[in-house]
Amino acid sequence: MDSLVLVILLVAVVGLALVGLVAGLVVSGRRKPQPLPDTHTDVVVSPPEEAGTTPTEVSAPPATIEPEAPAAPTLEKPEGTASRLVRLRQRLADQGSLGRGLLALLSRDKLDEDTWESIEDTLLTADVGVKPTTELVEQLRTRLRVDGASDPRTVLGEELLQLVGPDLDRRLQVTGDDGKPGVVLVVGVNGAGKTTTVGKISRILVAEDRHVVLGAADTFRAAAVEQLATWGERVGVDVVRGDEGADPASVAFRAVEAGIDAGADTVIVDTAGRLQNKQGLMDELGKVKRVIEKLAPVTEVLLVLDATTGQNGMIQARVFSEAVDVSGIVLTKLDGSAKGGIVVAVQRELGVPVKLVGLGEGADDLAPFDPRAFVDALLGG
């Protein structure tokens, strides 16, 4: 009986186990699967590469920053001619040493031969030149000794004015004919202030409302080209330039061509500073002038001379006048020279007038030459 009970219990346990297993499988089949945690990240997919190439990393293009437009340069307003002449008189007042020395000699009670020799020495020292000095002394002798003039100051002033040449045409020829611009060729040795003079002349013309183009034909000195460009930028004047070492004649030609195309009033051409003992360079200067005149006549050739060089400037003047037909003279640094007689000497040497004088380093310290103001300044009044 006990064995039977054990068997029944065993069968019951096994049956219950089978029932539980089946129930678990049924429940498991009905449960929905839980989603996986979201571990997805954005991936930049490179475009397919061609066969045989290595895939490259793709990155976003850098942001483009538009550069700010440069501010328009503030143009300077050059000084007018009237105020330049006022300053000319003031600056030339420092030249009174020559006139005062002459007046002191002429005012002596007795004008003997020693006095006249001293007058001659004073004039020669001031670089007036031998021939003009002889003429002036003869005129003074006649008027003070023979004619009996009583005012040495008045006589000296009148004779100096005649010596300087009050009737010479000192106008700048800066306009052309037949709709073409006037062409101004500026020549001179290095150190005389030639490039600076070109810039200052452009300011005078801009003050007169003229349309100006500059030609930087001093191609042997990069500094000269940059200097001229700076002068042009200050007053809104175009500058035509070439590469360093380029043919100066070609640059001059293109400058005149640009002036014609732009309808400019005046083209000013800066040339290389020539040493007077280099004939090849002087020949080249003649070539520049000939090439320019294929387009338009050269209306003015200005020779720039340093007033402080004295008789050395006379040598330069002679050589340049042989290379090109100089039509006018610009004397720079006149305020730094006690030898104002160079004005007389160089005019006599070349037979052309001094048209402009430089009286300082300022941008507008260049003025038309006024003979009467010059003589008044020499006499200290």
Image (cartoon, rainbow, N blue to C red):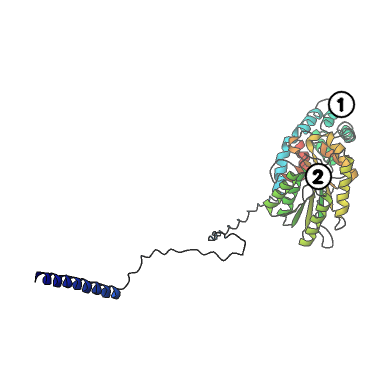
Q: Secondary structure at mark 2?
A: loop
Q: Is residue 4 left or right of residue 134?
A: left
Query: Which residue occupies the foreground of this view, 44 or 248?
Result: 44
Circles 1 and 2 in contact, beta carbons < 8 Å: no
Q: What amino acid is at disc 2?
A: Ala
Locate residue 206: give its quadrant. Answer: bottom right
The location of residue 241, given as percent across then percent down, is: 76, 52
Which one is closest to the eye, mark 1 or mark 2?
2
| Residue 151 visible in image | no
Q: Amino acid at mark 1?
A: Glu
Q: Is residue 168 above or below residue 130?
A: below
The residue under the point 51% across, 65% down is 45
Left or right: residue 117 versus residue 200 is right
| As drawn, 334 above or below 285 | above
Provide residue 59's location: percent of width, then percent of height.
53, 60
Compare marks 1 and 2 and give the one earlier in the sequence.
Answer: 1
For the C terminus, the image quarter is top right
Residue with the most extreme top position: 114
Which residue is depicted at the point 33% across and 71% down?
A: 33
Q: Residue at x 73, y 48 (%)?
A: 228
- Residue that carries the numbered disc 1 in the rendered image: 117
Residue 15 in picture, x, y percent from top left: 19, 73
Q: Which residue is mark 2?
A: 272
- Spatial CA distance of label 1 from label 2 is 43 Å
State the residue in front, 167 or 21: 21
